[in-house]
Each structure stands twice: as C-alpha cells, then as structure tokens.
Image (spheres, helix red, strand yellow):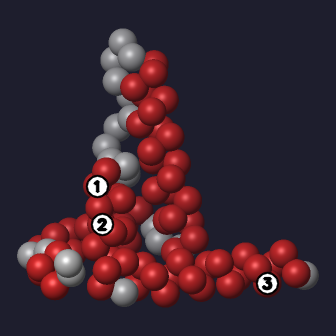
Amino acid sequence: MEIKNLLNKKNRIYKKIFNSEEGKYILNDIYKFCRIHSPSYVEGSSHKTAYNEGAKSFAYHIQSILKQSDIDISKFIEEYNKNNNHNILKGNK
C-alpha cells in the first residue's frame, strides 16, 4: 500500500506542475522536442531511430502520468501554440 500511495503522490505532483503556466510551457517544449507525433524511423540509421524512440519514451511517460490521450496532446499543443505568445519568458529573469 505504501508504494501505491507514493505513486499517487508523485502523479499528483506531476499534474500540479504541468497544470501551472510554467508547467504548460515546459510540457509543450517537451512534447515538441520529443517529436511525440512524428515518425521515429530514420532510414539507414538505426542509432537515430533508437534515439528518437528514447525521446518519445520520455514523453509517453509524462503522457501516461497525466492520463492524456494522443488527441488530448494534439489539442494541447495546437491550443497552447495558438493562444500563447510565450509571455511567460518575459516575466522571468
């Protein structure tokens, strides 16, 4: 039971962080960097393909914790980039 409580607490922390304005900014950056909706395969390069899959694995981990579907992620990325002009960077030093 202790492990389940720790996992639930970890998941609540992830959700709290990624629901903040700063967290949404970082989440958008992670999803774009990990190319979550792009093919991983690179013809002639098993190393680059493996690298791309590893990056996606990180994004999928977050997706799983946040319980987001692929459609949720697509909507998040589209809406975030449409409605946000990255003012968050201007307020931080």
Q: Are marks 1 and 2 in contact (CB under 8 Å)?
A: yes
Q: CA distance from mark 1 to mark 2?
A: 6 Å
Q: Amino acid at mark 1?
A: Lys
Kindly identify which numbered label has been placed on residue 5.
Answer: 3
Tell me the SS state at disc 1. helix
Kindly identify which numbered label has been placed on residue 13.
Answer: none
The residue depicted at 49 percent of the width and 87 percent of the height is 16
Tell me the SS state at disc 3. helix
Q: CA distance from mark 3 to mark 1?
A: 31 Å
The residue depicted at 57 percent of the width and 83 percent of the height is 13
Tell me the SS state at disc 2. helix
Q: Amino acid at mark 2?
A: Asn
Query: Which quarter of the figure is the N terminus placed in?
Result: bottom right
Q: Number of numbered discs present?
A: 3
Q: Amino acid at mark 3?
A: Asn
The residue depicted at 46 percent of the width and 67 percent of the height is 69
Residue 11 in the image, given as x and y percentages of width and height: 62, 78
Residue behind mark 1: 32
Q: Is residue 47 above or below residue 19?
A: above
Residue behind mark 2: 28
Residue 85 in the image, given as x and y percentages of width and height: 9, 76
Q: Residue furthest top?
A: 44
Q: Residue furthest right?
A: 1
Query: Which quarter of the figure is the C terminus placed in?
Result: bottom left
